[in-house]
Amino acid sequence: MAVAEIKFTFMSAVLIILFINPCIGLFICPTQESQALLSFRAALNVSNGILSSWDNGTDCCSVWKGISCNIVTGHVETVNLSAYTNYAEQDLQSGVISSSLCNLPFLKYVILKNIGLRGNIPSCLGNLSFLQVLVLKNNSLTGIVPPAICLLTNLNYLDVSINQLGGILPPCLGNLTSLRKLSVHYNELTGKIPLSLNKLSLLNFLSISGNKFNGSLQLTALSNLEQLFARNFSFQENIASSHLALPSSIKVLWLSHITISDTLFHNLVELNFLFLSYCTLNISSSWLPRFQLAGLDLVSCSIGGQVPAWLSTQYSLGRLALADDNIVGEIPSWLWENNPQLYLFNLSGNHLNGSLNIPTRFIRWMTAFDVSRNAFTGYIASTWPPDLQLLMVNDNSLNGNIPPSLCNLSNLEKLDLSNNKLSGSIPSCFANYKVIQMLNLGNNSLMGSIPDGLCSSSLVVRNNQLSGAFPPSISHCKRLQFIDIGHNRFDGYIPCSVGNLSSLQVLMMNGNRFKGSIPSEIFQLKQLQILDLSSNNLSGFLPHSIASLRALSIAREDGHMLSAQLNPFHEISKYNGIRAYSEFGSIPTIVYEVPSHDELDLVVKGLQWHYSYILSTLTGIDLSSNHLSGKIPLDIGKLKGLRYLNLSMNSLSGIIPPSLGNMSQLESLDLSTNRLSGKIPAEIQLVTSLEVLNLSYNNLSGSIPLGGQMITFDNTTYSGNPYLEGCPLPKNCTWPMFAPPQPSTNDIKDRKEDYREQIPWYVIGVGSSHVVGYCSVFLLLAVRKGWRKSYFMWVDTILKLLFPCMRNKRL
């Protein structure tokens, strides 16, 4: 009996050990599978440190990150590298999916999203008969969706979205009878949607947006389909009849760029969320829908007229977006009364008018309210839902004072009252906001000062009548990233404490009355990318530390947003505010994205430009129209990422620094109306990106360099410099056939060949004069017979003198 108990205890202990760590003892990762994983890793072309746990001398089941094995057999069942998405751009840019992954025959889950994969999807994945989940989302995969995937009969989740896949969807996808979720959105797929998809009886999620499909979409047999995303789909005409047929089980529907009539919704009794963008709606005025919506987005659908009457039948709306729909009139009261649970409301970009009297007793749960870009008049309402987090009433015709009751909105994160007719002062209680991220009060008629203690990630008060000194408390707002106080009446000195704003990226103080010198501490701000102190009364020398701006010393590529921390509304929503984006699974938390209101004006390329959002490529320094003196720092060329530099209308002296030739992304340079002297440095020819150059009204001398972009500028660029000569100025102007002497650098040697390919102007002149001369002679000979006879007799005489053998022959 004791022996039996010992055996039982021993076996129990073994089982417990195996249960706790199945890769210890009997069942470890098979050698052939670990070798397959190492080959797969090698094809990813990862850098050191990424997947470093994948060591040939360790067990893949217990040590290797992203790998999971069966607790009994030890076979690899999961490859999930989603934890490495943060490294994709810099460490996994050229990786491919190796066919060695197909040597893991027991794989059930393959998740390789957002890791920079390129190349094709291996057809051998079709041999993984146990595979249930295949996610290759958000990579750069090309080629086609391999038909071999149709062999994966156990697959219930397939996501190849956001890649560059082309071709057609394999008709055999209907064989994946276990499939529940299918996402192929944002690729370059073409052709028709296979009718065989109707065989996928378990499918409840389908996303085909952003491809080049055409034809009809017949899905009535998918009795379990609940979510359909088919934006940017090239439907045939008459969509509401036979070209789009949906099952009654649809609960979430997102369509765009199509024409829709009310008959489409006849059997959609379970519809809960409806998102239509850029659609043409042919809805009968007497239509009564059979569904009750929890969320409705009709964005840029050109509804026209008043708020659709059929909405009066809806009593469950939690979110409502009717943005950019050309709606007129007033907001009907029944919209509030019927839907007291509204938490998100967006009627921006219409022609609504009347006053903003919000019946808070009906919408006490609202957290986002946007009626910007309309024609509302009157005062801003004094009472608002207590939980409001976003309030946007900008771009209307509201007047009066800013009600102090807004300070009661303790959860407010974004407040935009800009572009109205507001007057009075900024309520001092605004300094009590604890979570405010964006505050825009620009383009009004506000007076007074900025309340002491006001702190926000983004603060815009430009184009008002505010006055006083720069608020000292702002210098202690560590989270401030964007500040625009331009075109007001601020005066006094710029405090050195501005250098404490370690997160600051945009500083706009132009058009005020600031005096004194520019604090050198400003140029220690590591993230500063835009600095505008123009049109003030600043004096003193230009600080040598200007070349220390770290964010401007790096040349950036086009198209990337400024740092994601710039402001809470840096993401530009293409639908002007509301965006519900799932297309991955069940409906997630609905996100409200506010279009950027980081609006600023910069004098760029000789004109004042208005920017409504900031890209990383918009980097600039504008110190024009002040009283700055001294020399331009010689090492200013370190700012290789700078695109716009304006130092005009000051009293700067000395030479133009040759280091400007290192500013490879400079597009606009204005040094006009100063006291600069010496020659124009030949190195400036290196800046091939230069589009606007103004050196007028200085004391420059010598010849004008004509290499690179310099040949494209006219005489206004150089006017007002009496000792300057060379083209395009009339003094000593001779257009060269080849490039003038260049600085002895390798970069300029490369540019010589480019310049020699250009056509010198004098060549054009000489060539055209020859053509005119020859044509004139031939025209005279053709018209005057006597001249023609004399000419040919003269030719006969010349030929006979040259060739005596021809004297006895008649020519």
Image (cartoon, helix red, strand yellow):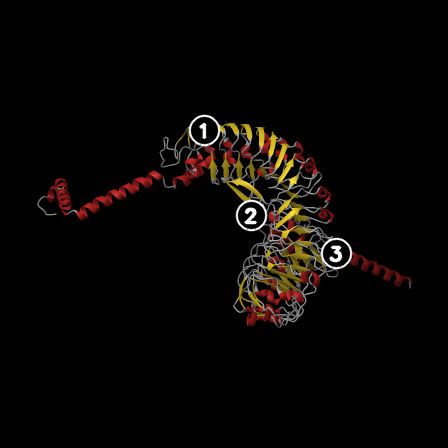
Q: Which residue is mark 3?
A: 23
Image quarter for residue 583? bottom right
Image quarter for residue 535? top right
Discs 2, 1 touching: Cβ within 8 Å: no
Q: CA distance from mark 2 to mark 1?
A: 36 Å
Q: Amino acid at mark 3?
A: Cys
Q: Residues within 10 Å of mark 1 (few under 14, many from 20)?
A: some
Question: Which of the two labelled residues, at mark 3 and mark 1, occupies the earlier sequence position?
Answer: 3
Q: Residue furthest right?
A: 1
Label ID, residue 559: 2
Disc number lying in front (2 or 3): 2
Question: Which of the two labelled residues, at mark 2 and mark 1, occupies the earlier sequence position?
Answer: 2
Q: Which residue is mark 1?
A: 679
Residue 511 in view here: yes
Q: Is residue 563 or residue 506 the one in the foreground?
A: 506
x then y, percent, for residue 804: 11, 41
Q: Is residue 423 or residue 606 the one in the foreground?
A: 423
x then y, percent, for residue 470: 65, 35
Does 690 appear above or below 409?
above
Residue 108 in view here: no
Q: Is residue 806 or residue 396 the one in the foreground?
A: 396
Question: Which of the two labelled residues, at mark 2 and mark 3, occupies the earlier sequence position?
Answer: 3
Q: Secondary structure at mark 1?
A: loop
Apparent side of residue 784 relative to residue 335 in the rendered image (left or right): left
